[in-house]
Image (tube, rainbow, N blue to C red):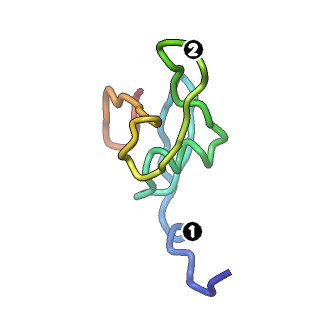
Amino acid sequence: RSGMPNKTAECPIVRFRFDGRDLEARAGENLAAALLTNGIRVLRHAPVDGGPRGLFCAMGVCQECLVRRLCVTDSHVHA
């Protein structure tokens, strides 16, 4: 470990819904990290062969982790 403090642990918990599941994350955490923390690895299926797709570059430039956000309210993300 680097000895750096874990600022994420100090952030409040937020709740959101993804594919019908109620999940929790830390405020300020990006959606991909929140889904991984909740054990969600498959984010979509390839249109050609139906193969599972998830994070690839983890930088938002390759479109493998494409997720459509439909509605955001005060403390809930509905996807």
x, y (%) of residue 48? 50, 12
16 up-or-down from 21: above or below: below
- Circle 2: residue type: Gly
Report the front residue among 27 and 58: 58
Secondary-structure class at tag 1: helix
Q: Which is more foreground, mark 1 or mark 2?
A: 2
Task: Please report the residue visible at 52 percent of the width from the left and 71 percent of the height from the top.
Answer: 10
Q: Is residue 8 above or below residue 61?
A: below
Q: Is residue 19 above or below residue 14?
A: above
- Asked which secondary structure carries label 2, the reply is loop
Which residue is at 36% across, 46% downward? 61
Q: Quadrant of the C terminus?
A: top left
Residue 55 left/right relative to 69: right
**Quarter of the image with the N terminus in it:** bottom right
What is the residue that sits farthest to the bottom in this orientation?
Answer: 3
Q: How many marks?
A: 2
In the picture provided, is 18 more to the left or to the right than 39? Answer: left
Which quadrant of the view contains residue 22? Answer: top right
Mark 1 closeness class: few <14, some 14–19, many ≥20 residues within 10 Å: few
Q: Which residue is mark 2?
A: 50
As measured in the structure, the alpha-carbon distance from the residue carrying label 1 to the one carrying label 2 is 37 Å
Q: Residue 15: percent from the left, percent from the top?
A: 49, 43
User: Of 71 and 36, which appears nearest the observer?
Assistant: 36
**Which badge, 1 or 2, is on the more N-terminal residue?**
1
Residue 46 in the image: state x and y as whole percent.
51, 20
Q: Which residue is mark 1?
A: 9
Which residue lies at the image location 45% right of the left edge and 56% below the top edge? 29
Q: Nearer the viewer, residue 52 or 11?
A: 52
Mark 2: few/some/many CA within 10 Å (<14, 14-19, 20+): few
